[in-house]
Amino acid sequence: MTPEREKALKNLKTAKGQLEGIIKMIEEERYCIDISNQILASTALLKKANLHILSGHLHSCVKQAMQQGDSEEKLKEIEDVLGKLMK
Amino acid sequence: MTPEREKALKNLKTAKGQLEGIIKMIEEERYCIDISNQILASTALLKKANLHILSGHLHSCVKQAMQQGDSEEKLKEIEDVLGKLMK
Amino acid sequence: MTPEREKALKNLKTAKGQLEGIIKMIEEERYCIDISNQILASTALLKKANLHILSGHLHSCVKQAMQQGDSEEKLKEIEDVLGKLMK
Amino acid sequence: MTPEREKALKNLKTAKGQLEGIIKMIEEERYCIDISNQILASTALLKKANLHILSGHLHSCVKQAMQQGDSEEKLKEIEDVLGKLMK
């Protein structure tokens, strides 16, 4: 596994633990704003994980495709990701 | 529990299941873009959960504070949430 | 005019100047990434302006509506703004 | 000028006109939420323009760099853009 994927994995496992905590907060009728802030923290962590995955992708899969001269599909994929991020 | 909190709870439990799936995808060396798209889907679900929490907050805690004439703190909290969302 | 609106006005005038600059960059065939970074800078400035407007709104219009006991519509408006920001 | 740049130019010119309108709205003390919604509309337009610029970049500059075998810098640039979008 690449270092980027390991970092993403770590982020996702932490985020999963946070979600378990947030679910408990709701069940325990904790204050709304505290819950909202926790969800924002998990959202930020998912973004970090996604950036690790995409960075790793650029420097491995996309790079290899370039070297083999068939990058069109890879470029289209990156374009689609950008489109989703910039909605 | 308010209907908004129940919806948020449902979203969060689904998101948690998705994270378990994404963690497996990484461990199984699945394709980066597929993993990235799944993370984006979970991120969207967390946003939905957060909107349920904040909507519920507006129409319960904030409204009650208004009726008791001490809304300053509640308004500040909403302002802080907006600040985080608009970073 | 409230201090918040003055700050928003200043941000918007700066952003408008930036857009004029970006339009020139495109016409002068400047490098894509430089143009993209400028657009991101203007986007951030619009977010700052919007936060000034919404903060001012909370502490004036929403607060007054609270004091007059008819805050339902104001709360719904804030909810709609949150919904747009969390799409 | 590429079709993507022309689309971006059109978006930016429209956004600039919108900003002029929003500036007037503030000067005419128009309602906060109406101003906020207009700013959100302009922000969305800037994102569209930026996506046109980045899509054009992928399929021209990045592709050419690939064909010349020196894509490292281009990949780093895309990574930086992703980082800014996912902050």
Image (spheres, coloured by chain):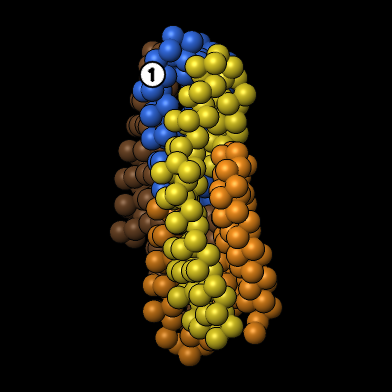
Chain colours: A yellow, B orange, C brown, D blue
Residue B19: tell me if it is visible: yes
Residue at position x 41%, y 72% in the image: B77
Chain of the residue that carries numbered disc 1 in the rendered image: C
In this rendering, position of residue A9 left or right of residue B87:
right
Instruction: Report which quarter residue D68 is drawn in.
Output: top left
- Image vertical order of residue D67 relative to residue D53, above or below: above
- Between A33 and D37, which is closer to the camera in this rendering? A33
Image x and y of residue A29, in percent: 55, 85
Say which element carries label 1.
Answer: loop
Residue A43 percent location from the top left of the image = 49, 58
Q: Residue at x 43, y 81 (%)?
A: B71
Observer-nearest residue: B45 or C24? B45
Percent x, y of residue C45: 37, 44
Residue behind mark 1 = C31
Q: Is residue D83 left or right of residue C66?
A: left
Identity, as a three-letter code, of the amino acid under mark 1: Tyr
Q: Residue at x 50, y 68 (%)?
A: A17
